[in-house]
Image (spheres, rainbow, N blue to C red):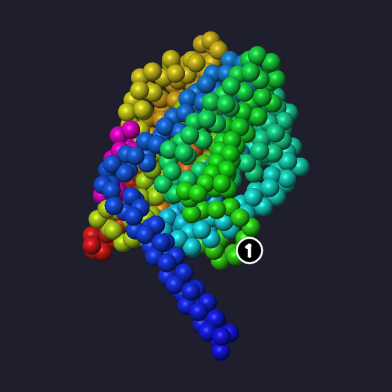
Amino acid sequence: MSEAFQIHDNQTHSKNSNGDENSLNSMETQDRELGTKPIKSLYAKYSIATLIGMLAQAVMVIFEGVIIGNGLGTLGLATISVIMPLEMLNLALGGFFGIGVASVAAIKLGKNDSEGAKAVFAQCFWFCVIFVTALSALVFFSAEGVASLLGATPDIHSSVVTFIKIFICGYPFLVTGQLLVFVLRADEKPGLASFFMTGSAALALVELYLSVIVFDVGIKGAAVYYVLSIGLWFLSIFYFLFSKNTIFKIKPTKIQFSVIGAALKTGTPYFIVQIASFIYTIVINNLLGKLGSSVDIAAFAVINAYIIYIFMMICTAMMQGMQPLASYNYGALKMERVKELVRVSIISNFVFIAVLTVISVVFAKPITSIFAAGDASFIDITSKYTIIVISLSAFGLTSVLVSGFFQAIDKVNISTVIGVSRYVIFAIPLMFIMAKPLGIMGVWYSQPIADFLACAFAMYYVFREVKNLKKAL
């Protein structure tokens, strides 16, 4: 009798405990600022906090180009251009896991499912560690063949191989670090995410200067720099291990592929967009090597690895500032807030990139000269190509932002199609078509045309989605 009473009492206590826990979880999600504060101020807060970290990365990238251009010369820049696809693969994997996990977790929080959000984070973290470590080992032992595939010409092949072997060893820290920083934003800690991004940029830049300029280590120093610049984001793991202010914890867990699959499905569009950039860079490096020389590849390095890269980082900051808001409010069925967010984010992104484009066109020669170590002919070539390539970047990067929006609301197919349109659907075919009558200039002129077409394509889906949101109100 007493035993039966004890069992009943334990069951009652368990039910009460679960009720209290569910109530607490509900309060955790309902009180979140993502669904309550004004959209404009929230978007500004999250975008600016992310942008601060991105600007630190941008400054780092500029100084990187100055140090490499002046310390390692044209061949050093050409090596960076050839290696850039591996950096894009790193970003692709980081977004694949990071955006996927953060978006799905934010949607679950919007639906008052904090346990589901915790499970997504924990399981995807461990899967990411295992997957990227295996990939790193595969690339490391295939470095010679990978260098040739990326378009390394004979004069830079050995440098590219050295770079690959060092860079790929840092991949587990690079990719996992990005995942953690993405989740920091979903956990309403954009300032902490910015801190890790900014600190990593500063420390990596010091290493690059010391290794290339002071100690003359050469391309090895540049490779270590590429590891540190994002790999140090991995230090944010201590927040998830020890902080009492987060519901996301890193702990041993049983991997369920159904849970991981849902997050990776959401991360797939960003991954495919970056893989499109990966393919585009390989194609253009090979075309420039065929139609021109390593000087043209070096010019593309300045444009793609530094100028366009900075533009893309700013667009990414705008997108990452928008995505937690879009995911949460879409999950909470607050469609009026989602509609306002679409308008504010697209206008902000377009205006910001357009202003930067005008500045870069007007000051093309002074900008490119900082990477050229006084080489007048290289400055002339690079500045001319820069003006052509970036002229309609505001249009092209609008399509990138729109792809990120559809990804955040879990419309994977639309996000993927928009994401690949800029490079795969438009730019790469245009390069081959225009190269026949125009030679190497056709390769350069293909990009602004592709940017305009990609924007028009993306806006069609935006207008269609806005109509659907109005119906849902």
Image quarter for residue 22?
bottom left
Count of number-bearing discs: 1
**As drawn, is 390 to the left or to the right of 176?**
left
Label 1: how many Cα within 10 Å (few below 14, some 14–19, many 20+): few
Could you tell me which quadrant the N terminus lies in?
Answer: bottom right
Amino acid at pointer 1: Lys
Residue at coordinates 50% horizontally, 73% vertically from top-left? 14
Residue positioned most to the bottom: 1
Residue positioned most to the right: 141
Image quarter for residue 454?
top left
The one nearer the camera, 176 or 367, is 176
Could you tell me which quadrant the C terminus lies in?
Answer: bottom left
Q: Position of residue 60 (x, y in %)?
A: 51, 26
Residue at coordinates 63% horizontally, 15% vertically from top-left? 213
Name the chief secondary structure element in magenta.
helix
Q: Position of residue 395 (x, y in %)?
A: 35, 39
The one nearer the camera, 404 or 282, is 404
Q: Position of residue 375 (x, y in %)?
A: 54, 12
Segment tinted magenta in the rendering: 340-352
Residue at coordinates 70% horizontally, 33% vertically from top-left? 166
**Residue 156 within the segment the image draws in magenta:** no
Q: Position of residue 23 (x, y in %)?
A: 39, 65
SS at circle 1: loop
Query: In this picture, is 146 found above or below 257?
Result: above
Residue under numbered circle 1: 254
**As drawn, is 323 to the left or to the right of 296?**
left
- Using the rendered image of the protein, determine whether residue 109 is visible from the camera's viewpoint: yes
Residue at coordinates 42% horizontally, 67% vertically from top-left? 20
- Using the rendered image of the protein, determine whether residue 89 is visible from the camera's viewpoint: no
**As drawn, is 307 to the left or to the right of 33?**
right
